[in-house]
Image: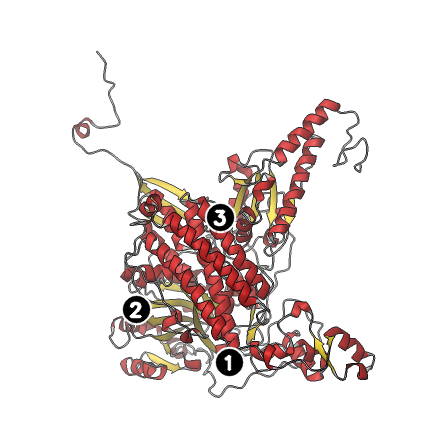
Amino acid sequence: MPRTIPDNSVPAAAAASDALETRDMLLNVGPAHPAMHGIIRIVARLDGEQIVDADVDIGYLHRGFEKMCETVDYNGVIPYTDRLNYVSPLINNVGYSMAVEKLLGISVPERCHYIRVIVSEISRITDHLTCVGASAMELGAFTVFLYMIKAREYLWELVESVTGARLTVSYCRVGGVKADLPEGFAEQCAKAFEETRRVLAESDALLTRNRIFVDRMSGTGKISAEDAVSYGITGPFLRASGVPYDVRKDCPYASYDRLEFDVPVGTRGDNFDRYLVRMEEMQQSMRIVEQALRDMPPGPFQASPQTGRSLPASEMVDQGKVGNIPAIRDACAVTDPTLDGSAKPLHVSIATAEKRVFLPPKEDTYGNIEGLMQHFKLVMYGHGARPPKGEVYFAVEGANGELGFYVVSDGGNTPYRVRVRPPCFAIMSALPTLIVGDMMADLTPTFGSINMIGGELDR
Amino acid sequence: MDAAALIQALTERFPDAVRSSHAYRGDATIVVSREALLDLARALKGDAAFQMNFLMDLTAVDFSTFGKKPSSAFFASSGVAVRPSAELPDEHPWPGPPGVPNAAAALGAPPGPARFVVVYHFFSLPLKHRVRVEVPLEENDAEVDSVTSLWAGADWLEREVWDMFGIRFRGHANLKRILTYEQFVGHPLRKDYPVNKRQPLIGPDGHASDHS
Amino acid sequence: MEPSIGNDMSGNDMSGEGGFLTSRLGEAIGWARKYSIFQYPFVTACCGMEYMATACSHYDVDRFGAGLPRFSPRQADVLFVVGTISQKMAPVLKRIYDQMAEPKWVVSFGVCTCTGGFYDNYATLMGIDTIIPVDIYIPGCPPRPEYVLDGLLKLQAKIQAQHESGTRPAPEARPELELEPWMPQR
């Protein structure tokens, strides 16, 4: 006859009833963790598999963006803005440049607005590709990740042909952009979009009606519209909860009010709706870019043909220095390939007319004293664009939501205070609310669909 | 409502609280005293005329070196004195940073910009208007009421202001550092904190550095 | 001593050691190690995007044998530190490095990990070699995937050489430079 070993851990009275002593487990996720999105630390209190409480610790990528902005001049902030939301750097560039232009009270040419819209939307597509791809990979769909990164490569090649860099572009300037779109951009863009559409169709076929994907994403990470607004959440996250707020539609900037596009809005506020909103937003972004390419005012390529023979700008300078004026009298300087797209005929379409803010075309810098002085007054130590004393707030639609820049100027050549209102900061502050009640395994799709970008969250 | 109408409505509603206002570059801005902040915030959120359901941003500015000598570039200059470029003209110039709070002025503080200004940006989705609310604070009394009871997003935003500037928020349940670490001493975005004063957690030998 | 006949690539004197079979075995082990890299991608920031691009189909790090990341330091042998390391993150990095078993190598991916990048401020670690020894530095902000693959090939050569020599040359940790605290004159 088996002898029952007295079990001292459970009181005899309790053993008779259904009450069991339970203890919650504290599980620490991060800061070094397998999720591809960023370094944060989540301390979850688990009751079995269910999360009953969570605490989120951020700041592991705090790089002092706001402090560094106070040490460089207004254009020098632009490389720092690239590295905020580093998957859609052009949107950050555009946002900051437009905030400082608002402070200065200057306007940029129409074509420049269209160029900014085009590159912003391409950046938005790369951001959503990375987000959806990475969250699919974390759920096990590695193929979708590879497909989406392949599409992202085509878009990065496109961005590289315009800006010179794949990721950290520093393309916008206060008062314009660095250079106009290259020749053949429209064809290259059409090819890249054809690839992207094919990838999106394939990914859609693989994921949207995939039983595992739907089961894991539906019903998890739900947030109601009121809670989302209270947390200050904006962007695709908010729109998935049913609130149709998009800065491009409600507070339009650049040339968005002249372009036709739809803003997808979800209903349930769970991870699956966010996935659908992002997939549809990519299609809409491509629609915007195609319209913009069709509608934008033509660059002066066609408007002012070159007269006289062309001469490389550096050679013109050399001839001028030795006094060989007859050789350069009827010559037209051609800028270096590295300055492609910023030549004098194109300058009027990419830069503001205000001389105290934007660099002159290189032909003028090399060719006449006024251009040289303008260049000197903008780049030398102690000089630079000097906005009047004041403060502005300007918001653009970032890939994660409203990306706002609050710039305070004291009349000097460096910003006095630059504050970036990070969209995913608001979403991450809601993370405890999102995951409490769900199971531990639901943390992965929820965290993935937040699209937390460490550079933007921690700055 | 456009900026001017918004400022007028708020000034009429809170005549004692609103100390000054402007609409520089079209941004409606009001400067309020800190005692009135919570009531004002409640009205902004609840009133049908304002309906500010979004607290977009909550930040602060340290005005202690405003307009003082120009900043040096990152690299040391050659020492040659140069005349700086002219500022761009401004038809409606900005009135300037908020002055010292009334309480401090009553105690005889010298006039001038307040050391800290807490800046709130509100947005109304139904009415599509924005307003900026500024609360000036003095350095030795840098405390203001927390608005976490009205907007849940204020929680982390206020923690960040505490971390970066050292401004306390009364009524905040969990005011601890968020971007820097617990052992960090000082508030980095203050103008008197040197930009590259590091406080390493571990030294080169890999052990925790002696870090007070 | 320089590499020459009788010395190996690291300059160690091979003339009296082991002999033919041992050196062949050493080469074989080096060959096996360099083509079966299990990386621990310690990804923090923007460089992570280029890391993803290098790992995926366009540039494909798998053809070099380094395609399988292991998300546990116990199972990895190369620590890819990708992206800026802040002061808050530094103890975590040190702990992950300590948890890895020998033989282990460290690749410093991106200029923020090499020297701190342009974030010379209170929050950033000025180069991870102030706290852990680094084998390969890949500068760039972020480095193109071609640079990363170049760095990977150099790492593979280093791995091969280390095993050929039989001893591992000790990389040195660089002590943090003492800088005068700099304050903007405003």
Q: Name the residue under label 1.
A: A107
In the current view of this chain or complex, which residue is farthest to the top?
A: A1
- Residue A146's label in the rendered image is 3
Q: Does A32 sit above or below residue C17?
A: below
Q: Which chain carries label 1?
A: A
Image location of residue C134, percent across then percent down: 63, 44
Asked if one can make out residue A168 in the rendered structure from this viewpoint, the answer is: no
Up-down relation of residue B51 to residue A20 (above or below): below
**Where is residue A416 drawn, in percent x and y?**
52, 72
| Residue at x 32% of width, y 78% of height | B17
Asked if B51 appears above or below A57 in the picture, the reply is: below
Disc 2 target residue: B53
Q: Which chain contains the residue that carries disc 2?
A: B
Measured in 3D between alpha carbons, the distance from the residue under mark 3 to the one under mark 2, in whole angstroms, is 40 Å
- Residue kind at label 2, given as amino acid type: Asn
Q: What residue type is labelled 3?
A: Leu
Q: What residue type is labelled 1?
A: Ser
How far apart in space, not on screen, are marks 3 and 1 (Cα)? Answer: 42 Å
Q: Which chain carries label 3?
A: A
Tag nearer the camera, 3 or 1: 3
Q: Nearer the viewer, residue A174 or A425?
A: A174
Q: From the top left corner, tell me how far across and down residue B111 is, in percent.
A: 46, 80
Q: Is the residue A124 above or below the residue C146 in the image? A: below
